[in-house]
Amino acid sequence: MNKTTTKGGGIVHTPKIELIERAASNILRFEIERPDGFSFVPGNAVMIGVPDSGEDPGPFCPTSDPADACLEFFIKIYRERDGLTDRIENCLVGDTLTMSDPFGDIEFQDTGVFLAAGAGITPFLAILRQLDAEGVAGGNQLHYTESNRMDLVQEEEFRQILGNDAHFVLTKDDFNPQRLDSDYLDEEVKVSDDNFYYLCGPPGFETDLVDWLVGKGIQDDKIVREDR
């Protein structure tokens, strides 16, 4: 497997795709080669690109165990945008991608509440899998919002890890549509200074949650999210 050096000095790896399968209605699961010497902390992201696609690389979080021989990614396909994820969807097993070294600010600190929207669930899947493997997932909560149940990533796995502390908020549910907003949080999340609060989703989603948490007296050092 080849790797080159970018202008900024970072390494760009060129792993091959080993497996592609559909994980949900608009989500594909990929397994790709693990570059020699590649290591990451659950919650980290990498920049993935499709060579010669004309699209800039974008951030995606590996969800595999850090010790696994390959790297797993769940990638949400945004067909309406006609961009990078469409190019990724058109890839085949054996094709080569570009991938940066890992980076990011989302890492597990201590027990807390995970708040995710859409593809923002992927760093938390990696973290909660590691906690489950270590037998210490108990006491954490997950609140994960998507449009429909068929769009959820690994719903049953989250239920197995967290039991009744895994909550799924479906904005277009036929029977009980909800939004993961301040009204929902007031009803469902008991705020405590002892917890950390992990956020990942679109910028507006994160901003609204930060405002809500700060309004409840939570300090910045208890809020874990990507530094934008």
Image (cartoon, helix red, strand yellow):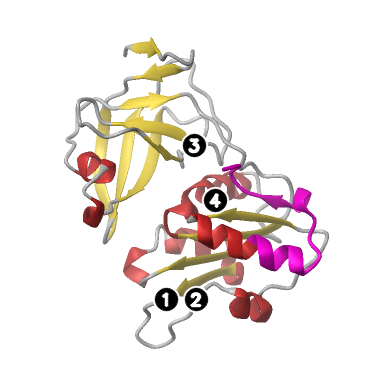
- Left or right: where 227 falls relative to 168: right
Q: Which mark is residue 179?
A: 2
Q: Is residue 206 above or below residue 182?
A: above
Residue 81 x %, y %: 25, 52
Q: Amino acid at mark 1?
A: Thr
Query: Which residue sits at x=72%, y=45%?
Result: 109
- The mark nearer the N terminus, 3 or 4, is 3
Q: Are marks 1 and 3 in contact (CB under 8 Å)?
A: no
Q: Is residue 20 above or below residue 112?
A: above
Residue 5 x %, y %: 41, 11
Q: Are marks 1 and 2 in contact (CB under 8 Å)?
A: yes
User: Which tag is nearer the camera, tag 4 or tag 1?
Assistant: 1
Queried whether the magenta region covers residue 224, the answer comes back as yes
Q: Which residue is mark 1?
A: 171
Q: Which residue is mark 4?
A: 124
Query: Which residue sits at x=51%, y=50%?
Result: 125
Distance from disc 4 to disc 2, alpha carbons, whole Å, reads: 19 Å
Distance from disc 1 to disc 3, alpha carbons, whole Å, reads: 27 Å
Queried whether the magenta region covers residue 54, the answer comes back as no
Query: Which residue sits at x=52%, y=60%?
Result: 204
